[in-house]
Image (tube, rainbow, N blue to C red):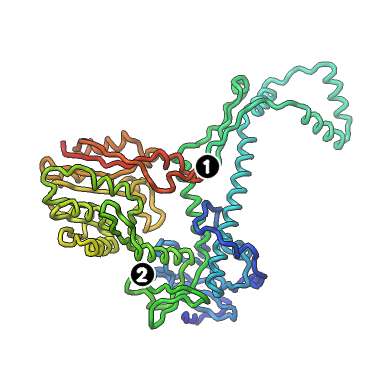
Amino acid sequence: MHTPDPRSPSQIRATAADTTSADDADATTAAPASAASANDASEAGDASDPTEVSEGAHPRITWAEDDGTLYSARWRSESGAPAPRRVVVGDDRMTADAAYKLVCEGTAVLWRGDYHNARQLLQALARRADRKRLDRKRGGKARRERATHPAARATHAQAQTHPPAQTHSQAQAQAQAQAQTPAQAQSQRQAQAQAQPQAPAQVQPVGEDSAQVRVQAQPQALAQGPAATAVDDSPARAFHLHRKAQAQRARLLGMVLVPIEPTEAGPAVPLRRAPDVRDACREAWGADAGQEPAVISLRELLGLIGGHEWRRKGVEIPALGGDRVHAYYGVFSPVRGEYVDLVAEAPLPAGAQELAFDIGTGTGVLAAVLARRGVRRVVATDQDPRALACARENAMRLGTAERVEVVAADLFPPGRAPLVVCNPPWVPARPGSPIEYAVYDPDSRMLRGFLGGLAGHLEPGGEGWLILSDLAEHLGLRTRSELLAIVETAGLRVIDRLDTRPRHQRAADATDPLHAARAAETTSLWRLTAT
């Protein structure tokens, strides 16, 4: 049971009055948990809220149950999400509309009802968030079309700058208008507006995610008034808007919470029809899993469960003869096998049969490929404890442990090698959570660090293999000339480049906001050597 809190109920927000409403019918309809996009969600609470959130790696949150009793538990979030400051209790009587209102206001819902109903509630919240964002995008598009219509603005500006001289008939009409009642004048203006033709213009949608429009007007209209407002429809803007929307969606859906109770067998979710989460929690949390009561976002718990299933089943690697690599939670899984094939097919440089370095090994898949190719000793480095343990286990599973040495290091191990391989994160952007460091490389730090230190760790005539996608180039986050400048500044030159196209499903998904960039993406193995 969660720890009772000694404070009085008046010190904490009570449960919401609308939690006793009838079931929401559409909350029973399943929807993908990864449905695209989101609406804006409020930040979780403020400093003046009475719900206590203590500082530390696992802060303690406090809430009131329906009977007014105060309880507290540790907040667990592997994604680094902040602990909610306002928490109310909800169960099967809470409607999706009531829950949606609460989470949009920054109040988290600690679920006490049926576990499967909690999952359905999460899906219902996702549908509401997606509908609201779609409505907002449509409204914003219409407003921008009106605001950026150049012909209308040009006509208005010309009329204000050079008003035409009145004719005798116009003067008479003006005098009659002044004598009209307000209702008569309004009726006449509406009739005139309907009869007046609009200046021609062409409006082309630029992208659904960015919700921007580009307006093309006739040249004479542009010459008569101010130019159309510049619209940033660049791929980089679309990427950042997409990430922002995904972060907002994650924050909103992360406000549905479930309790974790310690038991003799391990951590458990004390809800009806809840799954066994012992292995999933232990794999993500380590030795302290289930030591004390905790609260976790249901969305994150589903991620822990999914990560456990990925680890249990593994990913088949054709370059390893179909053997499987098992990724730990938080360690990048080699689901995109095309880059592994590049390492399996590139010609080994002279001397590489004796020694190779694998920098940032992750699961250890590339180290295993090199060992299977006959490299007698592979030193695989990483600085993430999970990745180190994961790489060692995979080496044992794959029978390469005698050849692969996994060591903790920030990039390079001591010494030099005839071959140094690195597959850094491909996108130069700030990670939104600790587990995103395998995908995003802020300011290309790892890329720059690898290239900057490569020449000093290569044997004479040795090669560095840089595995890198050009997705960042198609997104406008980095140019090819910038990459080549980093290579040249590091005292390196390009020997050759092996290319392959992505085979993952998202490359063919036309509904993806970043589809154009993904469809044009190429993954390359750059063969580099010291100048």
Is 37 or 485 nearer to us in this picture? 37
> Disc 1 marks which residue?
210
In this picture, is 87 found above or below 134?
A: below
Tag 2, which secondary structure? Answer: helix
In this picture, is 499 found above or below 264?
A: above
> Disc 2 marks which residue?
285
Residue 14, quarter of the rendered image: bottom right
Q: Amino acid at mark 2?
A: Trp
Where residue 361 appears, x then y in whole percent? 25, 55
Residue 362, quarter of the rendered image: bottom left
Residue drawn at x 18%, y 51% as measured from the top left: 373
Is 163 or 326 nearer to us in this picture? 326
Q: Residue most toward the front? A: 321
Q: Along the horizontal axis of the image, is 380 left or right of 61?
A: left
Name which of mark 1 and mark 2 comes first in the sequence: 1
Q: Amino acid at mark 1?
A: Ser
